[in-house]
Amino acid sequence: MMGIKDFFLKQALKYKLKDVPEAQREMFLHVMEKHPDFFKKIGDEVQKLTKAGQSELSATMMVMRRHQSELQKIMQE
């Protein structure tokens, strides 16, 4: 059963990914549901960098590059 926190997280992601095609958005949401700890870790690292003064885009790119191999493995499951 999906909790209220999960519901709001999904809605926020749908808003953030509104320009992404529906199929890719659904695939991304499915992967996030399977590996929430990994994506929480990514989010925490991005947030830490943005609080240190980096732009959100720059911080996200840096963190995603850092975890690229792990992300590729998750996406292939």
Image (spheres, rainbow, N blue to C red):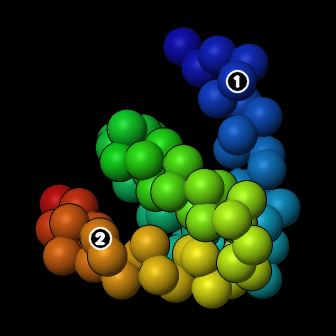
Q: In the rendering, at what x and y percent does residue 29 appear?
A: 53, 54
- Provide the secondary structure element on which disc 2 rests: loop
Above or below, 5 against 68 in this view is above
Residue at the image position 36 percent from the left and 83 percent from the top: 65
The picture quadrant where one finds residue 54 is: bottom right
Residue at the image position 31 percent from the left and 76 percent from the top: 66
3D distance between C-alphas at marks 1 and 2: 25 Å
Mark 1 or 2, closer to the camera: 2
> Residue 17 has which mark?
none
Closer to the camera, 55 or 29?
Answer: 55
Would you say 35 lies left or right of 52 here? left
Would you say 75 lies left or right of 73 here? right
Q: How crowded is mark 2: few (under 14 residues within 10 Å), some or many (20 or more)?
A: few
- Provide the secondary structure element on which disc 1 rests: helix
Residue at the image position 59 percent from the left and 20 percent from the top: 2
Closer to the camera, 23 or 44?
Answer: 44
Would you say 4 lies left or right of 15 here? left
Above or below, 71 against 57 in this view is above
Residue 49 is at least partly visible in this image: yes
Q: In the rendering, at what x and y percent does residue 58 appear?
A: 63, 86
Q: Looking at this view, name the residue that lies furthest to the front.
A: 52
Above or below, 51 against 34 in this view is below
Which quadrant is the C terminus positioned in? bottom left
The residue at which mark 1 appears reads as 5
Q: Which of marks 1 and 2 is nearer the N terminus?
A: 1
Q: Which amino acid does label 1 sit on?
A: Lys
Residue at the image position 78 percent from the left and 66 percent from the top: 16
Closer to the camera, 17 or 26?
Answer: 17
Closer to the camera, 47 or 72?
Answer: 47
Total residue callouts: 2
The residue at which mark 2 appears reads as 67
